Each structure stands twice: as structure tokens, then as C-alpha cells.
Image (tube, helix red, strand yellow):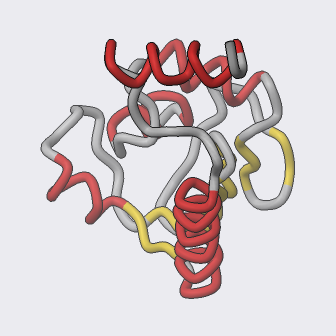
Amino acid sequence: MRLDKWLWAARFFKTRQLAIDAINGGKVHLNGQRAKPGKEIGVGAKLRISKDQYIWDITVQALSSQRRPAAEAVLLYEETPESIARRQAEVDRRRDERSLSLQPETRPNKKERRQIHRFKRGPE
């Protein structure tokens, strides 16, 4: 089965074109080496997938040429415990970073904008 088609069927990418772009961009490694989108993969192949700031280290458990529901797509691969821990740590770090940011979560309403303008103008 083609690598790009399997990545699409396993729901790592929304479209096959996105999978092809990721493979060509060096974001997907097959058995420790860069691969081409048409590379044939089989059960037992080891993949390293980088998407956004997350990295998956997985082993292919089954092949499927059709895109199935997410509950079935998870059965196509097995993720290593280290990979799960690393991704969870990244999720926690991003959540903490977001909660500590000084940016307000919403835009100021009309009353708050007037208060900001008054404050910036200073005493009159």
C-alpha cells in the first residue's frame, strides 16, 4: 500500500495531497529514512510523523485503503509509550503557556474600550 494513502486512511492528514506535501517536506520518515509518497509500506513498518509541534512514533499494525471512522483508524497503528508521553507533555506545556499569556481572551467591549481610551489620554 502507498505511504500517502495509508497516512490519509489512518487519519493523520485530512487529504492525500496534505500527506504528499508532508512526505515531500521531510515530515514523515519510514524506518528512520525519508521516503517518497508512493513508497510501499507493510505491517510492521515504523513511521515517525511530525505535524505542527507534535511527533508520533508508530508501528503499522494493519493496512486499509479506505478512510474509516476515527475509532477504526486508531486500530491501524500502535504508538510507542515514549511518543505518547512526549506528545502529552507538549500538550500540557502549550496549555500552561496559553494560560500564562498576558493577552486577553476576548476583545474589549464598548465600555472597556472607553476606559482604555480615558486611561491612555491621562488626566485632563
Tell me where residue 119 sits by quadrant. top right
Farthest right residue in view: 33
Which quarter of the picture shows residue 82?
Answer: bottom right
> Horizontally, is 79 left or right of 63 in the view?
right
Q: Residue furthest bottom?
A: 81
Residue at 53% of width from left, 77% of height from top?
A: 84
Q: Residue furthest front?
A: 124
Q: Nearer the viewer, residue 47 or 99?
A: 99
Q: Is residue 36 left or right of residue 16?
A: right
- Judge whether residue 33 can be spotted in this image: yes
For the residue pair 19 and 35, the one nearer the viewer reads as 19
> As drawn, is 122 to the left or to the right of 12?
right
**Residue 94 horizontal/vertical position (percent):** 60, 59
**Most foreground residue, 33 or 1:** 33
Instruction: Count numbered badges in the picture.
Output: 0
Please state the horizontal and vertical placement of residue 102, each as a whole percent of the image: 64, 47
Which percent across, then down, holds residue 14?
Answer: 38, 25
Q: Residue at x 66, y 33 (%)?
A: 39
Left or right: residue 11 compared with residue 53: left
Q: Nearer the viewer, residue 111 or 1?
A: 111
Q: Residue at x 70, y 21 (%)?
A: 123
Residue drawn at x 52%, y 13% as measured from the top left: 17
Residue 89: % across, % down: 61, 76
Q: Where, quadrant-wise, is the C terminus in this rendering?
A: top right
- Above or below, 106 against 16 in this view is below
